Amino acid sequence: MNRTKIFNNENKKLYNDFPSFFKKLFSQRVQKLSINSGFTCPNRDGTKSLNACSYCNNLSFRPFYCEPKKTITEQINEGIKFFSKKYPSKKYLAYFQSFTNTYADINILKEKYEEAISHKSIIGLVIGTRPDCVEDEILNYLSDLAKKKFISIEYGVESTKNETLKFINRCHTFEESKETIMRTYEKKNIYIGAHLILGLPNENEIDILNHAKEISKLPINFLKLHQLQIIKGTKIENQFMNNPEIFIKFSLESYINFVIKFLEILNPNIIIERFVSQSPRNLLISPLWGLKNFEIIDKIEKKLKEKNTWQGKFF
């Protein structure tokens, strides 16, 4: 599978958008199906920590059908049944989303991945993981698999500032993220995604704009931007309540304007897969913007036009 990047001017967008990339790559609608394969994380099981990342509550982004007690095939079938009512998708990607999906013995990983890829409706894998949990053995395996199937690894980079990563208990450094991304790139065939959270504690706007500069230096294909969401039951909830001064409190309008600044200095070849996250209202404390993802994307696109600007304008 060729990882050639598709430049945004081909689809007349003012940023390099993910749907246009997928449409050109697959020539049909392809839907991601989240999978919970029952993995854990090294900063949950005591290998590095027992406290998890300070912002993390896995229930905030896990679909109802993703239960580890169900087989991967059962989750795929239920996901297809759910999405087929909304979208005319015929092909799907199995998205190993919950926790750290390369954090297991290689034989266990192969068993789970191959159960997914053997499903007749699955044409590839998207694997969410941490940059400190990917050995060359699994990269070699995925690189071979990627010769025939779409394979993408999403790395939780979250911040390029080590002080922040320590504060939120990520238990890895930005240098580890860079090293793992480069190892993945060298293996060929595998698409590479990265996640960044905008508004983490003790970061200012200059720090966050520097994330755009640093991530632009790396050979990633996709970028997911997440506004920091304060979720019930997390350590960061207590920090938000007790030390609100260490947080940037983005309004919807200020967040949109800030994303524009971020895009302007971002490498234009990086495909934007997401601008915002959306957690269940019953778990979300802040921010309460009250709009769906597509509505916020529409506002970002309109703002780009109003400002006569685009991704990479100042790259």
Image: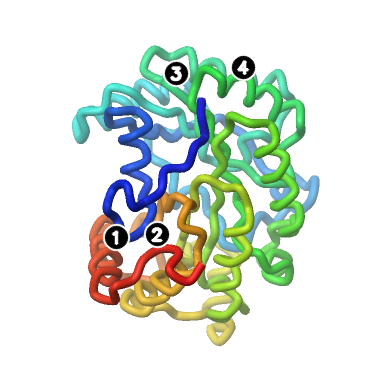
Q: CA distance from mark 1 to mark 4?
A: 37 Å
The residue wearing badge 3 is 73
Labelled pair 1, 2 in contact (Cβ < 8 Å): yes
Horizontally, is 29 left or right of 202 in the view?
left
Name the residue that disc number 1 marks.
297
Instruction: Tell me the kind of residue under disc 2.
Output: Phe
Residue 42: x percent and y percent?
Answer: 73, 45
The mark that comes first in sequence, 2 or 4, is 4
Between disc 2 and disc 3, the foreground one is: 2
Number of marks present in the image shown: 4
What is the spatial separation of the Cα atoms under label 2 and label 3, in whole angstroms?
30 Å
* Residue tagged 4: 111
Work out whether residue 46 or residue 301 is closer to the camera in this orientation and state it: 301
Q: Are marks 2 and 3 in contact (CB under 8 Å)?
A: no
Q: Residue furthest bottom?
A: 245
Of circles 1 and 4, the one toward us is 1
Q: Nearer the viewer, residue 293 or 79?
A: 293
Tag shown at residue 176? none
The residue drawn where x is 63% and y is 63% is: 214
Q: Amino acid at mark 3?
A: Thr
Residue receiving disc 2: 275
For the residues carrying marks 3 and 1, which lies nearer the camera in this image? 1
Q: Residue at x 47, y 48 (%)?
A: 59
- Callout 3: few (<14), some (14-19), or many (20+) C-alpha neighbours within 10 Å? some
In-front residue for pair 240/35: 35
C-alpha gap between disc 2 and disc 4: 33 Å
